Amino acid sequence: MRYYPLFADLSRKRCLVVGAGEVGQRKIGALASCGASEILVLDTREPDASMGEVLALPGVSFEQRSFKDEDLDGRFLVIASTSDEELNWRISRACEARGILCNIVDQPEKCSFIVPALFTQGDLTVAISTGGASPALARKIRKGLGEFLGTEYGAALLLMSRLRPLVLELGLGSPRNGAIFRGLVDSGLLEALEARDQATAADLLERHIPTQLAPRIPELLDGLC
């Protein structure tokens, strides 16, 4: 199956996780790290020491009880990580009826979305999906990306996040703005950041950014080289 790739904004969104085992805890942590405003966690087991860290995350609340259909009220996204097939199907069908995004861990036939393998480095996120056919292969590809994409990519993204608002503030227009950033990406800046060569990185910035921003170069490179 071909899935439509997207990145969802979870701020101000209410989520539900059913099942707080090892996999469920990873899902809770991922939702919290993406800023979900509320994550209700349901599990019939009493919380143990392994749950303590994730249950203390911002926005997370825990209730030791079984799932009820009313738990879906107002939910944007639901993840179920249980070994109960009947419960998994019940959650899947209830979410489908309500138009709620639903993921049943490792059971794509019950999902309205699947979670890809992710490679992250700072603000850089690369998602890898095999359409649910082989999560193991997706993880292998992710590992390969980690060997290919060095820390210079995260540093470059941080630099661009500092530079972009300064360039936009000049009001030069989209064509000129695009040319500035394309020029930087193709300039050898990544190699300079990888080598932690501040002098070369500063020289490349001076060549490619508007002259009005040249005094900001030390600030742009702070902590990156």
Image (tube, helix red, strand yellow):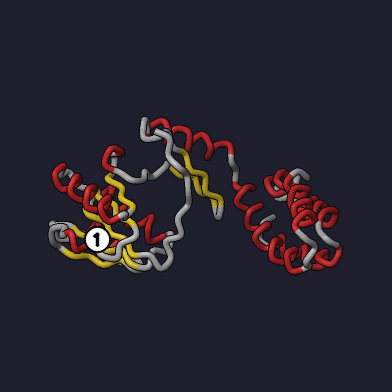
Residue at the front extreme of this rendering: 97
Query: Taking the image as drawn, is residue 53 in sight?
Result: no
Amino acid beneath label 1: Leu
Q: What residue lies at 16% left-to-right and 58% top-to-bottom?
A: 67
Looking at the image, is 183 positioned above or below residue 70?
Answer: above
Q: In the rendered view of the protein, which quadrant contains the C terminus?
A: bottom right
Residue at label 1?
72
| Res. 86 image quadrant | top left
Image spot of residue 130 (x, y percent): 42, 33
Tag 1's secondary structure? Answer: helix
What is the quadrant of the N terminus in the image? top left
In x, y percent, where is residue 213? 81, 65
Where 13 sits versus 2, above or below?
Answer: below
Q: What residue is shown at x 66% (from left), y 52% (from top)?
A: 156
Nearest the camera: 206 or 16? 16
Say whether residue 193 is left or right of residue 81. Answer: right
* 217 lies left or right of 3: right
Viewer-proximal residue among 214 and 42: 42
| Residue 46 x, y percent position in the rendering | 14, 60
Residue 194, percent from left and from top: 68, 46
Dot 1 crowding, Cα within 10 Å, few <14, some 14–19, many 20+: some
Q: Within the image, what quadrant is residue 158 found in?
A: bottom right
Q: Residue at x 70, y 49 (%)?
A: 193
- What residue appears at the point 26 percent right and 67 percent down from the top-left corner? 61
Number of numbered labels in the structure image: 1
**Is residue 22 something that shows in the picture?**
yes
Of residues 89 and 36, the one drawn nearer to the viewer in this rendering: 89
Nearer to the camera, 104 or 218: 104
